[in-house]
Amino acid sequence: MDPLVLPSIEARFPDLNGKVAIVTGASRNIGAEIGRFLARQGMRVVLSGRSEELGQAVVEEIKSSGGTAIWTTADVATDEGAKKVFEAAIQSFGSVDLLVNNAAQKGSKPFLKLDEASYQDSFENNVRLVYKLSRLVVAYQAEKQQGGSIINISSVGGTRAHRGTVGYDASKGAMDAMTRAMAIELAPLGIRVNAIAPGMTLNDDQILNPNPRFLPKFKEIPAQRAGRCIETAAMVAFLASNAGTYIIGQVIYIDGGLIAQLSPPSINL
């Protein structure tokens, strides 16, 4: 199979129909595709991020396809931003069944250049992006005794280091640990917590018309291509659905085999 031929992904999970999802960092790429995919399942989606213009464009796209979505501009690393998004979901749809913590500060620096401000932006901020909103959603779901699902979007950087992104990778490692710890505490309440760790992921246009600098990187991945945003989105839907009810506390890698290999093909060990 040609790795650049993109197969159709039409997974359907009818039990998600009518449920409510919050997706953070949803103005573009993986977050936006998660919003679109969940809306196609019939979920009512609350999308959030810091770009009003891009976010509203995603919402309008979902609505034009018959889905239900609203946009809330907020920084969910802050108490005010997390509360704003949570209250938007309750006021608009009356519930929260699924929280997808996708928002992240991707910039970082090598360790010797990791000053205090960069450390806080890349490590501490990324952990707060998960913690703040999760606390509100978990408290609500526990009080209502309705159960639910939290899915954290991590990275292969949580288990294998990128070069020069110490703060970012450390935050994803912390997210993975937080996922497991939250999962075992919340499972008795019927709240399932898992994480998805994508590898190199591009939108479909970037895969079909790749920047020449990406091509050597494709060859280092066993699948010989980058991941697609929709592949992560489909896994979110699976984990949130009844099909994933016995999956708890896991970090699921969507990476084309990247971390399974001891070394890339260019290094023959």
Image (cartoon, rainbow, N blue to C red):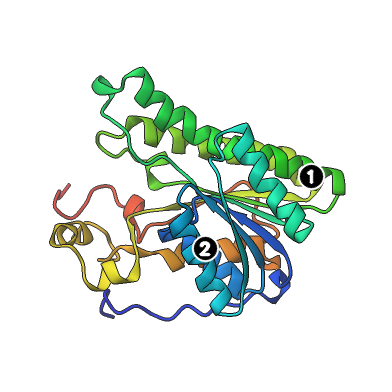
Task: Report the residue marked by disc 2.
Answer: 34
Question: Horizontally, is 98 left or right of 251 in the view?
Answer: right
- Residue 146's place in the image compared with 243, above or below, is above
Residue 229 location, quadrant: bottom left
* Residue at the spot 69% in from the left edge and 76% down from the top edge: 14
* Residue at the spot 25% in from the left edge and 33% down from the top edge: 164
Q: Which mark is residue 140?
A: 1
Question: Where in the figure is residue 161, as x and y percent of width and height?
Answer: 32, 38
Question: Horizontally, is 138 left or right of 251 in the view?
Answer: right
Question: Where in the figure is residue 59, as x and y percent of width and height?
Answer: 54, 66
The N terminus, quarter of image: bottom left
Label 1 element class: helix
Task: Give the mark nearer the N terminus: 1 vs 2.
Answer: 2
Q: Nearer the viewer, residue 176 or 80?
A: 80
Q: Identify the amino acid type marked 1.
A: Tyr
Label 2 element class: helix
Residue 199 location, quadrant: bottom left
Question: Horizontally, is 224 left or right of 35 in the view?
Answer: left
Question: Where in the figure is residue 93, as x and y percent of width and height?
Answer: 75, 60
Residue 159 visible:
no
As drawn, which residue projects farthest toward the front? 53
